[in-house]
Amino acid sequence: MAHRDYSRLAASGRDLRFRPAPGERTPPLVSPPIPRARRRLSDAGRLYSTREVNVHQTAPSGSFLAEVMAQTPGGEALQTCLQCGTCGGSCPSGPDMDHTPRAVFALVAAGEREAVLKSNTPWYCVSCYYCMVRCPQEIPVTDVMYTLRRISASAGAHGNGDAADFSRTFIDCVERYGRSFELELAARYHLTHSPLSKMSVGPLALGMVLKDRLSFRPKKIRDLAGFKAILARAKAVEKRLVAASRGEKH
């Protein structure tokens, strides 16, 4: 007996409940619900469009959720999180995180400020943006992680200072050269964080030098002045967002 063409039925919008015709063999229960599930997710995305969400109407004023959303461009989409786990399943650093991104978002919504700011999750984000590409609600996951890093660093709340120090050293190199300078980054970080325990990586560093994989001189980008102007503008925008989230005039 021929099976029903479920893809055609899904495209037509007809009901896909399993009602086999007399004498018709029931197909596997795995394939038919998929188009309907996708349609429901799509409908949910349209229903809770980020353009229709108003942070002042949905997030309590002064709450941790409102603060994070106000400091993140497009952060109002955070309150449309479906808790589907796509972000955590896509993250290459997920196994090393205290909490998956969706768990962090749930903690933010619950007002668990201390637990979020002490978590290593924002610091283990590698900015691959895979979570943002796959998120059905188009939540700026990576940008939220940057916001949480900034809040954690300014409050000195992060439990493990190594990650924050490494981030500051990396940012300093990027601001001065326009790109990372691996030798300076490694030297500044490792010499100030348990230097004796890092002696074992000496052969690795020597091998990188011999294979011309570790330069002794930084290579600056072209138009470094223009790049620094962009960073200065971004910092000004960041200050305005932070001030607005605190109800301050800037």
Image (spheres, rainbow, N blue to C red):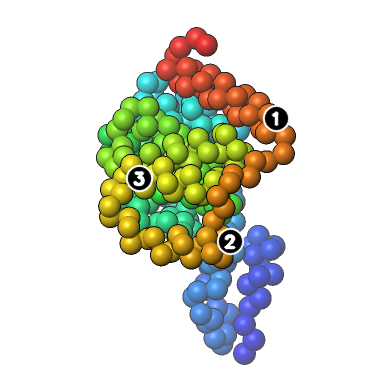
| Residue 204 tag number | none
* Residue 250 picture location, percent across and down: 52, 11
| Whether label 3 touches label 2, CB < 8 Å | no
Q: Is residue 104 visible?
A: no
Using residue 101 as the reference point, say whether residue 34 is left or right of it.
right
Q: Nearer the viewer, mark 2 or mark 1?
A: 2
Which residue sits at x=54%, y=41%? 140
Which residue sits at x=55%, y=73%? 31
Q: Earlier in the sequence, mark 3 or mark 1?
A: 3
Relative to 55, does residue 117 appear above or below in the rendering? Answer: below
Relative to 207, does residue 239 appear above or below in the rendering? Answer: above
Q: Which residue is mark 2?
A: 212
**Quadrant containing the N terminus in the rendered view:** bottom right
Label 2 Cα neighbours within 10 Å, binned few <14 / some 14-19 / many ≥20: few
* Residue 161 picture location, percent across and down: 31, 39
* Residue 170 picture location, percent across and down: 48, 41
Q: Secondary structure at mark 3?
A: loop
Q: Secondary structure at mark 2?
A: loop
Task: State which quadrant residue 25 falls in.
Answer: bottom right
Q: Which residue is mark 3?
A: 191
